[in-house]
Amino acid sequence: SGYHVATSRHRLATYMLLVLAASASLHTAARARPPTCVATAPPVGTSYDTGAFDAAVMKTYNRYPLAVAGGEGCELVDLDGRRYLDFAAGISTCTLGHANPKLAAAVAAQMGRVNHVSNLYYIPEQGELAQRLVATCNLDKVFFCNSGAEANEGAIKLARKRASLRGVERPIIITAKQSFHGRTLAPLEAEI
């Protein structure tokens, strides 16, 4: 997993890197039958018991009738063995591809050392990454967080702070209509 950074310049650089990584995963060996494109051909159904799932999991999304068993690169495989191109990529959070051996090895090695350390402590790798980002992305500092919600909250707070320093008492946050900026209060309020 990566870090979300609440600066527009870095987001652009991050998205560019993620697009390059996703493009690289598209150049895998050709398959005898191309995968189904979920965006143009919705799944035909699933053998999975969706009723039991829906009885236990709060409905926060309208789900496709697709039960994922695994994935490889930019493809998902359902419980019935059908393959799909994964255009959602975990809603843009997992764009490095599925079952990537190098990523799996790196995550396993990290889990062998320590899995999660609070930002209350110094994390040498975090410092190294921050230094590289500052040096290569024309940034002053970076803001590390754990989710898009935190990134959006942080971006709104930083924008309001900057506006306040410039004498703007009531800054306006501009968003796109019918867009999604997370489920926390500040982004939801900004969308209204």
Image (spheres, helix red, strand yellow):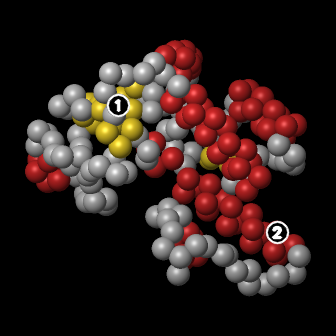
Residue shown at 71%/50% (left/top)? 12
Could you say which is closer to the camera, residue 140 or residue 42?
A: 42
Q: Position of residue 67 (x, y in %)?
A: 23, 40
The image shows residue 186, relative to residue 68, as above or below, that is below
Q: Which type of secondary structure does the marked residue at label 2 adopt?
A: helix
Could you say which is closer to the camera, residue 83 or residue 55?
A: 83
Q: Position of residue 80 (x, y in %)?
A: 17, 31
The image shows residue 13, relative to residue 26, as above or below, that is below
The image shows residue 20, relative to residue 156, as above or below, that is above
| 3D distance between C-alphas at marks 2 and 1 | 50 Å
Query: Nearer the viewer's eye, disc 2 or disc 1?
Result: 1
Side of 64 where 116 appears, left or right:
right
Residue 62 occupies quadrant: bottom left
Q: Which residue is mark 2?
A: 162
What's under tag 1, amino acid-wise? Pro
Residue 158 occupies quadrant: bottom right
What's under tag 2, amino acid-wise? Arg
Could you say which is closer to the camera, residue 85 or residue 182?
A: 85
- Within 10 Å of disc 1 (Cα), the crowding (few <14, some 14-19, many 20+) is few
Q: Which residue is mark 1?
A: 34
Side of 51 where 60 appears, left or right:
right
Q: Is residue 129 visible?
A: yes
Residue 74 occupies quadrant: top left
Q: Is residue 117 visible?
A: no
Q: How many marks?
A: 2
Residue shown at 16%/46% (left/top)? 45
Of the two numbered discs 2 and 1 on the same chain, state the one appearing first in sequence: 1
Q: Position of residue 114 (x, y in %)?
A: 55, 22
Which image quarter is the N terminus in? top right
